[in-house]
Image: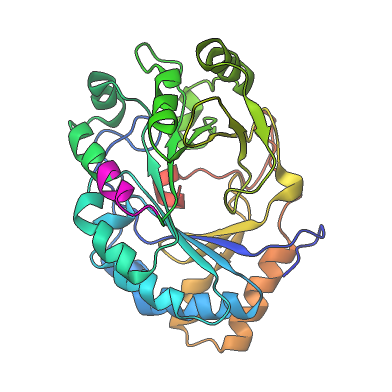
Amino acid sequence: MNDGHGRTIDYLRISVIDRCNLRCVYCMPEDGVDAVDHTEILSYEEIIHLVRVFAGLGFRKIKLTGGEPLVRKNVAHLVKEIKRIDGIEQVTITTNGILLADTMKALAEAGIDGINLSLDTLNTEVFQKIARRDSFDKVMEGFKAALKYREIPLKVNCVPMGIEGQNVLEMAELARKYPVHVRYIEMMPIGLGKQFEFCSEESILEGLKERYGEGIPYEESLGNGPGHYYSFPGFQGKIGFISAISHKFCESCNRVRLTSQGYLKSCLQYDIGTDLKKLLRENASEADLREAIEETILRKPIGHQFGSQIGSHAEEHMMAQIGG
C-alpha cells in the first residue's frame, strides 16, 4: 500500500485502550482522562477483523499500544490471533512495564515479536515525579521478566525532559549491562507534551561520548520505525534515537495509527482520518473498509509541521487518547 507521496505504508499502530495505570506528566492529567465507555472501544473481534483487511492491503507489522495495553484483559489472546493472520509478519507491544512480570509468559507463548518498555529515569524519586505513581519497582520487575526471554527483542524508550535528576545518560547503563537497546525519544508537542522542551540528540550523544567513548553509527535495521542507532564500546545493546523534531524523518514514514475507538489517523499531528468503527458497526463490506483505508492512506500528509502554525486539523487529543 503506497500513499499519495510514494511511501510504502505497511506498519499499523493499534491502541487497544485509552486507560493507563500511570499519569505521566507529558501524557495524562493527574486525574486521568475521561475514559470512554467500553462499548465505544473496539472489541478484539473488531480489531482482528480490521487487521485482516489491513493485511490484505499489504500491512505486515502491528504495534499494540494504549494508554497502557496490558491494562486490558487477555491482550496475549489478541497477539495470538493477529499472529495467525496471513501476511502479518510481526506483532510487538509498547508497555510501561507495571503488569509485564505477570503477563510476559503469556505474551511469549502467544508469539510476541518484541517488547518496547517505556522508562524515563532510573531515579525512583524522579520516576514518581514524572509518572505520579510509586511503581518503579514493578517496572523493573517487568524489565527483568522480559530479559528472561532472550529471543524476544527488548527496547527501553526514554523521553528526555530536561528536569532535574532525570539523568538520561544513566539510562544507557541498561544497554551496557544487558542485551537491550535504549532509545531516546524526543518530546512530541502533542497534548501535555507541549509544556516541555526536548533535549537534542547531539547533546545526549556528546554526554555519552564523554562517559563511554565514541559511538559508531550502526547501519543495520533494529525495528520497524525511524530509530537510528549507535554502538558504544563494551555495550551489549545499542543506543538509539527517535528525533522527530530535530531530525525529521517524514519522508520515510511507513505507519498509520488506529485509535482505541477505531479512528484511523494518517499522521500524528493532524486529526485527519476515517472512523472505521462506524463503518464496522454499520456492517460495511470488506470492500468498503478497504476503500476507506486506501483513501485515508492516499491523503496522508507529506509530513508534520511541529513548531509551525498549521491552521485547521491540528490534533487536540492527548497521546493516551491517540495511542502512543
Q: Quadrant of residue 83?
A: bottom left
Residue 63 percent coordinates (x, y): 48, 59
Magenta region includes residue 212: no
Residue positioned most to the front: 234
Query: In the picture shown, does residue 188 fall above or below 49?
Result: above
Magenta region includes residue 147: yes
The one of 217 and 283 positioned closer to us in this rendering = 217
Residue plotted at (55% across, 30% down): 186
Can residue 303 be seen in this snapshot?
Answer: no
Which region is colored magenta?
Answer: 143-150
Residue plotted at (34% across, 58% down): 17
The one of 89 and 53 positioned closer to us in this rendering = 89
Q: Quadrant of residue 167?
A: top left
Residue plotted at (50% across, 26% down): 234
Query: In the picture shown, does residue 32 fall above or below 83?
Result: above
Give the colour scheme shown.
rainbow
Left or right of residue 153: residue 73: left
Left or right of residue 316: residue 314: right
Q: Quadrant of the N terminus?
A: bottom right
Left or right of residue 154: residue 231: right
The one of 106 and 29 positioned closer to us in this rendering = 106
Can residue 184 be seen in this snapshot?
Answer: yes
Residue 105 percent coordinates (x, y): 25, 61
